[in-house]
Amino acid sequence: MVVLNVVTSSCEKKKDAVTPVVEKNDEPRFEPNWESIKANYKDPKWFNQKKFGIFIHWGAYAVPAYSSEWYPRQMYMDSANFTAQLKLSKMGPSDVYLHHKKEWGDQKKFGYKDFIPMFKGENFDAKEWIDLFKKSGAKYVIPVADHHDGFAMYKSNTTRWNSVDMGPKRDVLGELFKEGRSQGMIMGASSHFAFNWSFFNKKDKFDTTDPEYADLYSSKGKNLREPVSDAFKQRWWDRTVDLIDNYQPDILWFDFYLDIPDFKDLRPKIAAYYYNKGLEWGKEVVINDKNFDHEAFPEGTVIYDLERGKLPGIRKLPWQTDTSIGKNSWSYVTNWQSKTANQLVDDLVDIVSKNGNLLLNVGPKADGTIPEDQKDILLQIGHWLDINGEAIYDTNYWRVFGEGPTEVEEGHHSEGKNKDFTGQDIRFTTKDNHVFAIMMAWPESGSVIIKSITNGEDDVLDVKLLGSDATLKWSLTPEGLEVKLPKEKPGDFAFVLDLKMNNNK
């Protein structure tokens, strides 16, 4: 069993206690076990109110700008054996492996480490980024603090491989946190470092086995099945605590691999440590986790996150979808393919109607600029929220999430299976005595019947179309609420009917 130099609170003295230790301010303290955390944790209300955040994947992998942010892993995928272990359908050397050898040279002479001096971020401007994110309507920002590649995008006290000592020579995370908080944004950080243990293929013909770079490529040996070592667990702990202590993130987002059995003992310890720090700082903090095995972080101890996927119905506990503007990558690549603002607004609406948040990723270039197509999409979303934001922010889910023929697939990485919404698809949110009926497309008939609003159960006082001055004709019929729409559309996508109710149930 690994013995960790874990920094703990005084509440650990009573190991078997489930009841929280109460401080002078009557705030509970969390012990490093799930019983204590379940007893004392409650999802912060503020998270569920914000609804829309920005994710940022930016690192040295933006220098080759090829394939995806997994370039550092795939550039060492040289054999059928290695790719088979990764459950990939393609056998033999990966496309990225061959591309790297052609464009950059042999992986022994030019490894991933050699991209880091080229990663300068010379045009990075934290204010410009935060200004853009605010205009997009986002309420929180989560930059990737460290990805699987092992390079920290902040001033790290635990690794030399960080953006202050190498590459941009700047505290990227720190600058974003300072600017974001000055503009009233909630600031979080994501940690993908657990998978660094198994991220790089280790063979003598690569630079990944050179002991001089073991602190970047991990100290794992050549055995693909080698369990996570105690030393690496300690390194993960020290690195995560350093990030928590020095940046005080409002949200701590964990990627997969932390969910594997090797990290079982650390999960409740890091949750307790972080939640206790939140109390020390005087603020409610949030852990986001993908929870792939559904047991790693028990329900009600963190906020569940779905990667590139959604839920088919309402989840009463808050949850989140993280997805990228890019269809084919999270980090900038030269063949980046953007989704449309229409698709992303529809995703936001569908997710919020089911009690979720949308965390939308951008991929800046290596020089620190955000590409124009990504900027344009963010500004389109922001324009839509300027008109329709009251149907999104601070809202709750209604008695049903929606109606219409289009269903969504459930689960991680399911978004590619979803169909576009139609004029018959409606999603609902509610606030006070208002129900917002959001038409996912403009009905071709010029009118809509909302079947979930019934004559016997609902008392509608007024109906307005957000963004339009038109007076609407409407009536409650046996089929539902029928609304005649104006000839002029008040926008390009997702149209919101504001229903003022006398008895909003």
Image: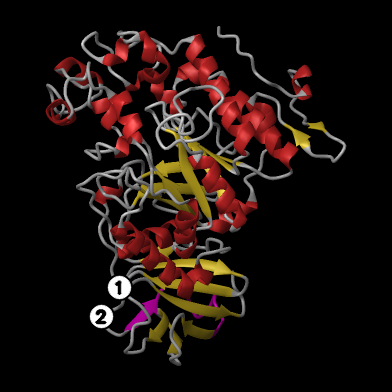
Magenta highlight on residue 248: no
Instruction: Tell which residue pokes out farthest to the right in this image.
Output: 24
- Circle 2 — which element? loop
Residue 465 placed where, x, y %? Answer: 45, 82
Residue 45 placed where, x, y %? Answer: 64, 52
What's drawn in magenta, residue-wise? 447-461
288 versus 185 height, above or below: above
Check disc 2 and give the amino acid type: Glu
Q: Nearer the viewer, residue 220 or 417?
A: 220
Q: Are marks 1 and 2 in contact (CB under 8 Å)?
A: yes
Give the numbered dot on residue 444: 2
* Residue 220 visible in the current orientation: no
- Circle 1 — which element? loop
Picture residue at 41% right of the left edge, 59% below the top = 348
Picture residue at 40% right of the left edge, 85% below the top = 483
Q: Find disc 1 in the rendering and name its residue.
A: 423
Check disc 1 and give the amino acid type: Gly
Residue 354 placed where, x, y %? Answer: 47, 56
Total numbered circles: 2
Picture residue at 42% right of the left edge, 71% below the top = 383
Residue 273 placed where, x, y %? Answer: 66, 28
Q: Of helix, strand and loop, which mostly describes the magenta segment?
A: loop
